[in-house]
Image (spheres, rainbow, N blue to C red):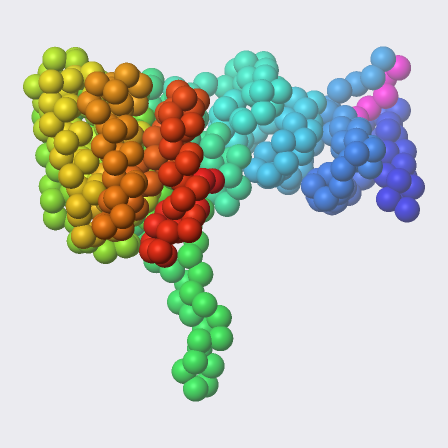
Amino acid sequence: VITQGLQIIQEHAKQRSDNDDDSNDSRHPKLLPRRQMLDLLIELMSNTSGRVQSHAVACFLDVAHSASGEVGESGKQTALAQPDEIDSLINALENPLAAVRDAALRALMIVKKAFPTEKSDYDQLLRLTRRLWISKFDVSDENKVLANEIWETVGFNSSNGEILCEELIQDIAHPVEPIQQAVAHALANLLHSNPHLLPDILEKLLKLYHEKLAMVPPKLNDFGRVVEQPIDIWAPRRGVALALAQLAPLLTPTTILPLIQFYVSNGLGDRNSIVRQEMLTAALAAVDLHGKSNITCLLPVFEEFMDKAPKIGSFDSIKQAVVILMGSLARHLDKDDPRIKPIVMRLIAALSTPAQPVQEAVANCLPHLVPSIKDEAPKIVDKLMDQLLKSDKYGERKGAAYGLAGIIKGMGILALKQLDIMTTLTNAIQDKKNYRHREGALFAFEMLCTMLGRLFEPYIVHVLPHLLLCFGDSSQYVRAATDDTAK
């Protein structure tokens, strides 16, 4: 049925007139309900796939040709697209499907003669300019090429950057992710040519983030009971994070500090995990590009947070992100820079946080920093060994195992022998008097396997007999640690 309907639309779309006067010609393209045809075909392209979608695209382009304003070789007349038909094509550029956006761009190229001017319809021209500029940065490479072709052919320009920036800000909160991604790139490209607008745009982005933090309140019944949970509209906040990541190369010493403060106080602790990850990506981009030249103002922000953050689970995700940022910051310093040692000590202290993501983040940062503190490494290893085997707190011992594995990875596999680590751990796993020694040794073996991978395989042969004995250990904690290590 759909195919037959498409054939009927296609047949009518191919009708042409012999003259420009439609009053005496019932086949004149001007008489087609083109706006409704375009909307119907856009919906059909959005909800189908395969051959049906391909047929709908071909039909869609035929309808566009009927409004191209071109005259055929034999003098056959077409109509000129009306403003509402151009609006339909502009709206299709916001579609989640790349195939629909592709078809809309091809249709716009066909009806370019009907594009508005500043005098005829300034508002529509602004909307068209905005959508085409965003399409120039589409996630689909083919769509980028098409949008650039239209832009160059029609002679559009982005000379009025301030107005275009204002327009683009509205799309940061767009519900469609591919559009959000394209807008982020489009905004960054525009600000590259208009750097004086950056502070104002950053302010508007942060304001938008705070506005979108509010949740839709829960619905209550007559008795005050919650019948519908509150809804978090988080997609606009993701749009802000995507834009901030693209603006990272344009940051200046005056704009990076307040932005990093925003990340630490708000962005990295967002209630939605997707937004948190995008915020961390944006923060890492800022630190990677500007950390070395701004370390004196950025490091205190991270240190103050690590000192004052409450020791509760809700702050673990922020601590993890701050640890990663501190490690990234330190990696940009020269190996002999005296500022690396305090950062490493701060990371080692963060290992006491009883949260696996934080401890894992520290372990991944340490290998890159260890070459800068080689002289201090044996003392740090001794301290971690003591914490691993003697601490009363499970979280501290687990953190010590992570830290130990990270440092060994940074020093090289030979450090296991040079610092007598394997002997100490082997003695600890055989200690029948103190279950914490056995459990701590198992934590260390687990993390060394994870961090060192195949490099640790030669040592597994020596550990295996002790590991098998621990499966039948009298302590349930040791048995649980053995299960984790064996995996």
| Residue 368 relative to residue 57: left or right | left
**Residue 304 image offset from top left, x and y in percent:** 11, 41
The image position of residue 460, as x and y in percent, is 41, 28
* Quarter assignment of residue 200: top left
The single residue placed furthest to the left in the displayed view is 338
Q: Is residue 375 above or below residue 389?
A: above
Magenta part, dominant SS: loop
Q: Does 115 appear above or below 47?
A: above
Q: Nearer the viewer, residue 429 or 100?
A: 429
**Quarter of the rendering containing residue 95:** top right
Residue at image location 16% in from the left, 13% down from the top: 334
Which residue is at 33% across, 55% downward? 475
Residue 128 left/right relative to 429: right
**Start-end of magenta stretch:** 74-78
Residue drawn at (86%, 44%) of the image = 2
- Which image quadrant for residue 244? top left
Task: Depth check: give the residue in front, 119 or 197.
Answer: 197
How many numbered marks have been drawn onto this rendered protein structure?
0
Q: Measured along the vertical axis of the image, is residue 15 above or below residue 415?
A: below
The residue under the point 17% across, 29% down is 381
Residue 54: x and y in percent read 79, 31
In this rendering, would 82 be left or right of 416? right
Is 113 positioned to the left or the right of 333 in the image? right
> Is 268 contained in the magenta span?
no
Task: Depth check: give the residue in front, 266 or 322.
Answer: 322
Task: Identify which residue, 132 or 273, lies in the foreground.
Answer: 273
